[in-house]
Amino acid sequence: MQVQVKLFAFFREGRFIKEDRELPEGCTVGEVVDTLNINREEIGVLMLNSRHCQFDTVLHEGDICAIFPVIGGG
Amino acid sequence: MTDKIFRVNMTDLSTSIEDVPADWAGHGGRGLTSTIVAAEVPPTCHPLGPNNKLIFAPGLLSGTTASNSGRISCGSKSPLTGTIKESNSGGTSAQRLAKMGCKALIIEGQPQDDSWYSLSLTPYGVAINKEEELVGMGNFAVVETVEKRFTDKIGILSIGQSGEMQMSAANISVKDPDSHLRSLGRGGLGAVMGSKKIKFIALDAGNSKVEIADPDAFKAANKTFTKALVDHPVSQALGTYGTNVLINIINEAGGLPTKNFTSGQFDGHEQISGETMHDLIVERGGKPKHGCHQGCVIQCSQIYNDLKGNYKTSGIEYESIWAMGADCTVDDLDQIAEMDHILDDIGIDTIETAVAFGVAMEGGVLEFGDSDEMIRIMTEEIAKGTPLGRIIGNGAASVGRTYGVTRVPVVKNQAIPAYDPRAIKGIGITYATSTQGADHTMGYTIATEILGVGGSADPLSKEGQIELSRNLQIATAAIDSTGMCLFIAFAALDDDTCLPALVDMLNARFGISLTADDVTNLGMSILKTEHAFNQAAGFTNLDDRLPEFFATETIPPHNAVWDFSAEEIDTFWNF
Ligand code: SF4
């Protein structure tokens, strides 16, 4: 299945901003993080289709998965 | 030096130095300005008349070596909202005031003729001088000239043309360590300073220092506190990308108000994002990391250069970039930086002014996305005080009334900032109930709703949001009294050593023995003092509401509406 993966802030360094990825059925958000060699401890926020989600959230065809480090502002 | 109250009466041009009344002694920053406004300003007075007062107070820890403690509070009755107002800024003024032993500067009365004045403060008192040369000038010229008259070490508070013309969105500008500007923004306190006919205030602390009751304990507590700040990953991201790192995440969450609050996502988000801004700054030899005052260890500010590598602006915030960018559908960072610089010079609030532009675009005054016309209106109309310039300079509600627009995002007349309350509901409670009109900084629920700091809350659900906003508004009122930058809150929410160290510093500074509960109680009592002032000024629970359109118009992509009932909102004040 095709899933769009978006990265933000320093997660983009040496990786990409946005990429369509071919993933096996049943793949979770956490597994995407792992294949990108991002340490799970560095994760601040995960979103699936603009809603917050967890490492064990299962992806589906056409999903948009956004991965952020710990960030803040105001 | 023993702390004193410096008082200036602009009616008879007299000054005095007074002992600090016993019940003001435990207050600083916002707690002190709000206490003084409540004690001395008649709630029903006209904000621009002789009975309103303008009060500056450094925080309780300002002027010490405590990290991030150099924030100044300015309080008054707001000409924009009609409520009590406390505005908070970095820059060098808080440290100068604290070092000269000025616990608060109270400016009252109003000159009876058309003359302009400046104030000059030293540890020995206040001098009032007539001012002619700088009248009509922008803030950058004021800073340059005043530094030549005194020294470049001088602290400066000044108003630009908008403050002189008493526009309701006018700021008071605060010089930073590099002679650039920070702002006491929101709520139009620059207009109050203009109504008192004061163009600038020069602050010379000489070699005076703040006395610390227990220096060793202070040093130890500051070490723990500083470590908590520096180690927190949010601090590190703030130093790299500034607050503008939020553009992409708020856009992704569908809560980035776009095109005058008609969508929650902006096609041009990447072009105006913190990531893009960081790369541009580095490419052009600017500084991605910069402190708004000496002693800041987070450094969310930055120096932004133009295409040729020359200085353009500094300290440009997410909310400003959102307002001039997404809300007006401008996707060009250089144009936004140019506008930020112009608005700093005129001395007018970037959020209020840009949201006013968004409403003006909806009203057909100019096209969405036309940043050239925005720049023309800023320099040719607002700075010169033409009728259109004054309509915009009096804020979003003023534009809505003038041009018959009903989608006007304000609470108590103050523009709603960069987070849509339909898609991020907790912040809507803060907008509705804040004692000062719509203001995200009063209770920054975004930390928990979106950023996952201090727990988590579903931004699209009402669950737990009132309590979240209440707890954060209480904590914020206390933090705003210490002189601490609000961005210490990220570490305070997550790191158990941070707040106790802050309390230890307060105790070591004054030789007292506060507990964490005392600090929470301080926050509650400040909110109650402010709320009581507003009630006496004529505000009721019916003013604690969002504009009607938030309940009737959905916002994509979540197609959410504002669905808190009036009864639910009113439970906010149950404490
Ligand atoms: S973190 Fe930013 S706003 Fe806070 S004190 Fe530092 S530069 Fe100023």
Image (cartoon, coloured by chain):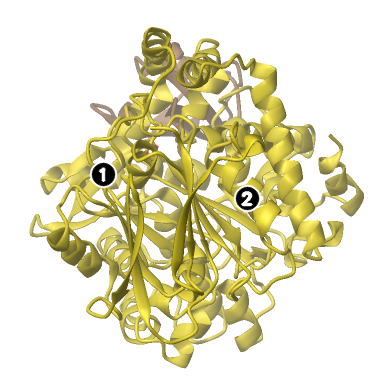
Residue shown at the point (60%, 15%) measured from the top left? A56
**Distance between mark 1 and mark 2 Cα atoms:** 34 Å
Residue at disc 2, secondary structure: helix
- Which residue, as the protein is rendered here, is positioned at the far bottom? B387
Disc 1 chain ID: B
In-image side of A68 versus B471 (left or right) = left
Residue shown at the point (63%, 50%) measured from the top left? B36
The tint chain A carries is brown
Say the numbered circle drawn on residue B333.
none
Q: Position of residue B138 (x, y in %)?
A: 28, 72
Q: Which residue is mark 2?
A: B36
Classify B512 as above or below B144.
above
Quadrant (top left, top right, bottom left, bottom right) of the C terminus of chain B: top right
Give the amino acid type for the residue marked by disc 2 in the picture: Ile
User: Ligand 1 is located in which of the four quadrants?
Assistant: top left
Q: Which residue is mark 1?
A: B302
The tint chain B carries is yellow
Q: Are marks 1 and 2 on the same chain?
A: yes
Q: Position of residue B93 (x, y in %)?
A: 35, 47
